[in-house]
């Protein structure tokens, strides 16, 4: 895992330099990995994880489909996706997203 050496990290500037939907691991907190990414309006396919995933929108908005229900997470809001819950990104998501997740085997 590549991590940034600077501290504090300018999350918005870091995300601005990323390819959309390609996360950058910033570091680990215990078993959890903290990542940042840039959203670009395009949807992503459904996925589920063995552990709870934290999604923090710094700017913009995240449009989700969680367990079949639409959900909007706005700037400054945090959504916790429970372990095992199916979720997908709907069209219209844009901005900067921080993800905190426990990496699964094989990742």
Image: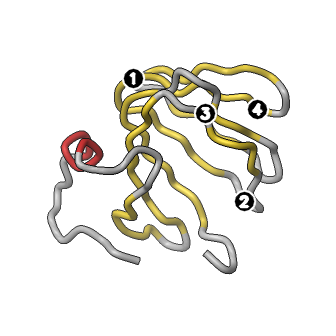
Numbered mark located on residue 51 in the image: 2
Residue 85 located left or right of residue 32: right
Which is closer to the viewer, label 1 or label 3?
Answer: 3
Disc 2 to disc 4, how far (Cα)? Answer: 15 Å
Residue 14 in the image: x percent, y percent?
23, 50
The residues bearing labels 4 and 1 have C-alpha atoms spaced at a distance of 19 Å
Category of crowding for the residue at label 1, using alpha-carbon neighbours closer than 10 angstroms: few (below 14), some (14–19), many (at least 20): some
In the rendered structure, the answer to whether residue 18 lies left or right of residue 65 reads left
Residue 44 position in % (x across, y down): 63, 40
Residue beneath label 1, please? 60
| N-terminal-most mark, 1 or 3 | 3
Question: Which one is nearer the viewer's eye here, 39 or 55?
Answer: 39
Mark 2 or mark 4, earlier in chain: 2
Looking at the rendering, in which quadrant would you find the C terminus?
bottom right
Calculate the distance from the C-alpha at mark 4 to the C-alpha at mark 3.
13 Å
Residue occupied by mark 4: 66
Mark 4: which secondary structure?
A: strand
Q: Which mark is residue 43?
A: 3
On the image, which quarter does residue 95 sit in?
A: top left
If you read the primary sequence from the N terminus, does the residue marked by circle 3 or circle 2 appear first? 3
Residue at left 49%, top 49%? 99
Colour scheme: secondary structure
Numbered tag placed on residue 70 in the rendering: none
């Amino acid at each position: 895992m590549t991590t940034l050496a600077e501290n504090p990290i300018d999350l918005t500037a870091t995300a601005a330099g990323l390819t959309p939907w390609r996360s950058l691991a910033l570091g680990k907190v215990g078993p959890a990995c903290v990542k940042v990414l840039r959203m670009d309006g395009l949807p992503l396919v459904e996925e589920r994880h063995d552990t709870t995933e934290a999604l923090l929108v710094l700017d913009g908005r995240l449009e989700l489909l969680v367990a079949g229900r639409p959900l909007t997470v706005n700037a400054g809001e945090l959504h916790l996706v429970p372990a095992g819950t199916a979720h997908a990104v709907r069209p219209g998501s844009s901005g900067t997203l921080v993800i905190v997740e426990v990496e699964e085997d094989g990742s």
